[in-house]
Amino acid sequence: MAEENPVWGQERITNELLLKLGLRVSPRTVAKYMPQPAPGRPRGGQRWSTFLRNHARGVVACDFLVAVTSTFRVLYVLVVIEHRSRRLIHLNVTAHPTAQWTRQQLREAVGYEERYEYLLHDRDAIFSAELDESIRRLGLRVLKSPPRSPKANSLCERVIGTIRRECLDWFIPLSEAHLRQTLKAWVTHYNRGRPHSALGPGVPDPPASSTVPLSPSRHRLDDFRLVQAKAILGGLHHEYSLARS
């Protein structure tokens, strides 16, 4: 109970055991077996992972990745992801990333609706004080990850790794426009067709008619339904669906 509910104290756990499970235990006994808090973190304080999980509905995160064209031109890709749904809400490419360009991209991603509460990014110099202030005027609180702590922005780091493994490692972009076009096609597949284990499994942005009932037979499709395959990125990936014969 203490590990699953880090804000509970010994009295809270004692009462839970008594009222819900019918176990009468002394608070001192509970305290004896409670895990000790990590050094530097106040007892009962909320872990970073717990905070992100509790506020996932209102958290978006962003980060940059680098791509190199066939002519060895370095391009920068800004990625913005929504924590709760794992949906990529914005992606764009530039050869000259500036604070002004980044600010405009974040405005387009977040919008002026009150959908989100927090924006998480690292301490790169491009995220200037003026940029953070403009984000605050949109109604968001800026969260900066600690120095040299990529796990603090793990969802964004993970999706960047996924972009490389499932897209950029298989393509050599010819130009900025080619890279942008390729990534946008992959993002559509990522949001609407790629299953995510963390969602159950599920799809971040499923179509309205995406629910398919499980077949009563484990290895056979009923009603003579056919499996349709849709090629993505020239056949690098495929999306499958059912159709009646």
Image (tube, rainbow, N blue to C red):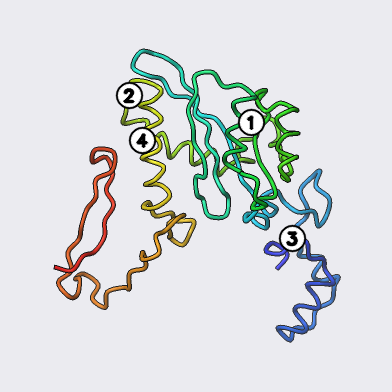
Question: For this view, does 184 lie left or right of residue 24?
Answer: left
Task: Estimate the spatial distance between the alpha carbons at disc 1 and disc 4, rounded to whole Å.
Answer: 26 Å
Q: Which marked residue is nearer to the observer: mark 3 or mark 1?
A: 1
Query: Do the residues under discs 2 and 4 have CB atoms within 8 angstroms?
Result: no
Horizontal and vertical percent position of residue 51: 70, 53
The tag on residue 167 is 4
Does 51 appear above or below 106? below
Q: Residues within 10 Å of mark 4 (few under 14, many from 20)?
A: some
Q: Which marked residue is nearer to the observer: mark 4 or mark 3?
A: 4
Question: Mark 1 is on which residue type?
Answer: Arg
Q: Which marked residue is nearer to the observer: mark 1 or mark 4?
A: 1
Task: Estimate the spatial distance between the alpha carbons at disc 2 and disc 1, rounded to whole Å.
Answer: 28 Å
The tag on residue 172 is 2
Residue farthest along the bottom direction in this orientation: 22
Instruction: Locate residue 140: give its quadrant.
Output: top right
The tag on residue 103 is 1
Question: Mark 3 is on which residue type?
Answer: Pro
Secondary structure beneath label 1: helix
Secondary structure beneath label 4: loop
Q: Nearer the viewer, residue 49 or 4?
A: 49
The residue drawn where x is 17% and y is 75% is: 223
Question: Mark 4 is on which residue type?
Answer: Cys
The tag on residue 142 is none
Instruction: Locate residue 244: give its quadrant.
Output: bottom left
Question: For this view, does 11 lie left or right of residue 144?
Answer: right
- Along the polypeptide, which appears first: circle 1 or circle 4? 1
Residue ID for mark 3: 6
Task: Estimate the spatial distance between the alpha carbons at disc 2 and disc 4, rounded to whole Å.
Answer: 10 Å
- Along the polypeptide, which appears first: circle 3 or circle 2? 3
The residue drawn where x is 62% and y is 56% is: 57
- Along the polypeptide, which appears first: circle 3 or circle 1? 3
